[in-house]
Amino acid sequence: MKFGVIQFPGSCDERDALHAASLVGDAVLLWHRSHDLQGVDAVIVPGGFSYGDYLRAGALARFSPLMEEVERFARVGGPVLGICNGFQVLCESGLLPGALLPNTSLRFVCRQVALDVVDATTKWTGACARGDRLSMPAKHQTGRYWAPDPVLDELEANDQVVLRYATGNGFNGSARDIAGVSNHAGNVVGLMPHPEHAVDPLTGSADGLRLFESAALIAAAYPADLLGK
Amino acid sequence: MRRHAELGLTDFEFERIVALMGREPNEVELAVFSLMWSEHCGYKHSRKLLRTLPTEGPRVVMGPGENAGAVDVGGGMACAFKVESHNHPSAVEPFQGAATGVGGILRDVFAVGARPIAILDSLRFGEPGASARSCYLLDRAVAGIGHYGNSIGVATVGGEIYFEPAYEQNCLVNAMCLGLIETEKLIRSAAAGVGNVVVLFGARTGRDGIGGASVLASAELGDQDASKRPTVQIGDPFEESRLLECSLELLDRGLLVALQDLGAAGLTSSSAEMAAKGGVGVDLDVARVPLREAGMEPFEIMISESQERMLCVVEPARVDAVIAVCGKWEVNATAIGKVTDTGRLRVLVGDEVAGDLPVTALVDECPAYDLEPAAPATPLYPAPIRTLADDGGPEATLLALLGSANLASRAPVFEQYDCLVGSRTARRPAQADAAVLMLDAANGRRPALAVSIDGNGRRVACDPYRGAVEAVLECSANLACVGAEPLGLTNCLNFGNPEKPHIAWQLTRAVAGLGDACRALGVPVVGGNVSLYNEGGEGPILPTPVVGMVGELPDAARAGGLGFAQPGDTVALIAARGWAPSLTGSELAKLHGAAPAGELPAADLGELHALHAAVRQAVRSGALRSAHDVAEGGLAVALAECCIAGGRGAEVALEAGSEAALFGEGPGAFVVSGDHAAMAAFGAAATAIGTVGGEALRIAGVLDVPLDELARVHADGLAHLMR
Amino acid sequence: MRARVLIRPKAGILDPQGQAVERALPALGFAGVRNVHIGRLVELDVEDPAQLPAMCEQLLANPLVEDYQIQRPDADHPDQSAGPDDSAEVTR
């Protein structure tokens, strides 16, 4: 199982994602300017402040050369996980619906949050069960998920809401307490909290490992040619 | 006013400059001297005192004098760390002042080749309840620290915040950073190799901070500080993240002879210091410096404090490789000069010489003044406004203390900081008395570093010697509570105008206390910073030596925590024989409207050294389930903090229920919990006082307060001021 | 030619920055202020102003959550700073 973690100028949590993924399989850093996904089985778009969050968070990173390959990879069903800034990049690129807006408090908040697993059929939540409670940290200033109401209704109807902040745990004002969503096919998932910071009991919880394990399960179950590589 | 006086130089200093130069300096040369001989760069009033501090020890790999000090942390690795102040800029523009303070200390750490892993901040403001301005400064400084640290991806893992009227006009923003490096790769800043090329890399140079070191840091802030607004530097963490990666790659590839960051006084101090350390000269061509603004004068280019810039010395054959690495990271790099054997710093504009100065005159010959200390004849600090009546009883007193700005939960502040990036944080803010950062796994264990930053201006105002001793003890106690042994210390001395005898007295006594405590505990000083002239029309700040200490623990799995963990655990008070809690200089005395004055208890340093070791050992052995140092607010507050952090109540009985016993302060006591048998390890120092359990803190015959009330008051104390 | 793009949050989406400013103004003594919204200004020299809408759609604004307005100074007076009423093109 080989994970690829993209590195943009200004990414912060790419090494953390690399470390987390390497607990489950092999993991490599992919430089944003390359056009080569190096044959990875899954792509992670990490957290941080790519391009300094200039213009809008994720707005510039989505045009990196490597993102073209990621879009192709996603279209044929490749598993793609966007964490925090990565979620912002995926929404900007249209791979995920909706947008991330400034927290209603306008402040950066770093806090451990409890999440409810709403959909366990995506390629990143297959190792979970619906209703599972996951504890992991969230740390962001621009994490208020928003989409027009009809879109939100559609997401809920199509099982595209993947994770919700448990009651009392949301702090950013996200619509319907949505913490993470997927695309229609369930191979692209974005979430604001950080699973890569929940892989070691010594630093908090290890619940985040399950997202990485989910992707590894998929890679093990499906031969490479189905992913269009 | 004569020109040199406008720039902050005394007549005596000017005459000395003329004598060293052999002539009168021109405009460029005078500007350079005014900065190099400013208090901030030259340490004129503190250098002699700082020499009395202990700087050696078996774990020291780099002592004071470099960009950062460093200690050996095992496994071939060293931890480089330092604390620095950015007080005056933060008073003028708190967001950028605090942000660039963080940027500056980060650069100091990666200038020695270490990758920064953690930031801590020590902040002091006026009373937020009484002053909208202090609320504003707090809010913006915290936002600035968060902005810079979070954006560059270095975890902010700890800090402290205090509010005292004496800081109203002069806030304090001290930033500490630690980084990791393979010991053999530590790089120094001495320029060497005649003919080597001096390369400037990083951001373009503009007019930021012009006159910062001389104008702001070396003078009292008066009514004219609105006009100082243009001198505040603006930071760009995104630029710095590229600069950091670029610098580390240059060092990794062995391409540099020397590296120095540009901080106070910009190119001037960096080039002069590099040359002085190397015993060489430097020629700089300011026409080659990439500029952000048109029409900059040579002296402006030399003294600009534009952020995110570094200076390095490179062998001629390697310059192309250096430029290429910088290009990869999209960092501007330009050869701007060369190392010479003249012993002079020459400022050139193309072929024209705009300034020609002897290096030793700028650095080594900077005057070092003797202080003329005299204890103050009258109290320096007015009594604060009383906010708590005497007759409320212990419950009301406890709640008032927990909800006071100095003791309330700092969550509204530290939640604005990313404390997790880097995946090393085993103890987050408020989980333990010190932050704990894991190193690479070794032999099936997770060795870790612990770090704390502490100081208490009010207690130092009561007694500068004993107060400074307490600051060192506080750090050591905090480290002991997580199971860490101190390795080294950095300090920032924040004081008023040293030319005034009573301030000189504070400074002299505090440094003496600092030194004695460090010697007694065996903790060397590896570096630090001095910030003087922190006073305005209303008087000086409280004398505030801030201490940052780094320690090591063998296994993060055994790192201590502060909260009561298990119902049924024995709660014990571990106290030195000499522990003598008193209300002098305490938080309660402040709420009662007492001025910071009176005698502090003497500390038996030998006994406390042994006590800290005993606590540390007990935590490491896993025998204790919690450990918390008794500090501000005294024993009752410490017990409440353990309850709140653990989400559990406790029932205890104390020998004495007086205010001094409950809320008195003084070094030498800890609240621990664990198996009853574990307490035997402390011998006579331990007194079992009760048990963890229930939904309230009950001190028999004294108070009984529900846990959720304690938690609510504690959570809200600072939060309501920050809304 | 010098163009200016004003980007603002779409009506109906919560704008906490605008609200924060709206609350702060009365505290400073400024009464009668309502409906504050905070957006962004992009100024640029362009050779082909026909490309501006596409630039806005693809990069300068996020059309899902933002509206934008392109302003071009009168071509005969390129140095005039454009006010909101000058040759404004309202889009989206």
Image (spheres, rainbow, N blue to C red):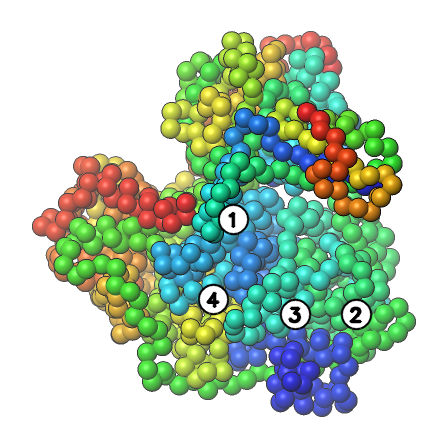
Estimate the x, y position of residue B219 in percent, counting from the top left: 55, 74
Q: Earlier in the sequence, mark 3 or mark 4?
A: 4
Residue at coordinates 39% horizontally, 68% vertically from top-left? B166
Q: Earlier in the sequence, mark 4 or mark 2?
A: 4
Q: Earlier in the sequence, mark 2 or mark 1?
A: 1
Residue at coordinates 69% horizontally, 48% vertically from top-left? B239
Callout 4: chain: B
Q: Which residue is mark 3?
A: B211
Estimate the x, y position of residue B175 in percent, counting from the top left: 52, 57
Quick one: B269 or B394, which is closer to the camera?
B394
Which residue in the rendered view is the most extreme toward the left?
B701
Question: Mark 3 and mark 1: span between their CA atoms?
Answer: 25 Å
Question: Mark 2 and mark 1: span between their CA atoms?
Answer: 35 Å
Q: Which residue is mark 1?
A: B143
Residue at coordinates 45% horizontally, 58% vertically from top-left? B133
Estimate the x, y position of residue A170 in percent, counting from the top left: 43, 29
Q: Earlier in the sequence, mark 3 or mark 1?
A: 1
Determine the image quadrant of residue C62. top right
Callout 1: chain: B
Estimate the x, y position of residue B211 in percent, counting from the top left: 65, 69
Mark 2 lies on a secondary structure that is: helix
Q: Tell me the amino acid under the disc marked 2.
A: Pro
Q: Which residue is mark 4?
A: B170
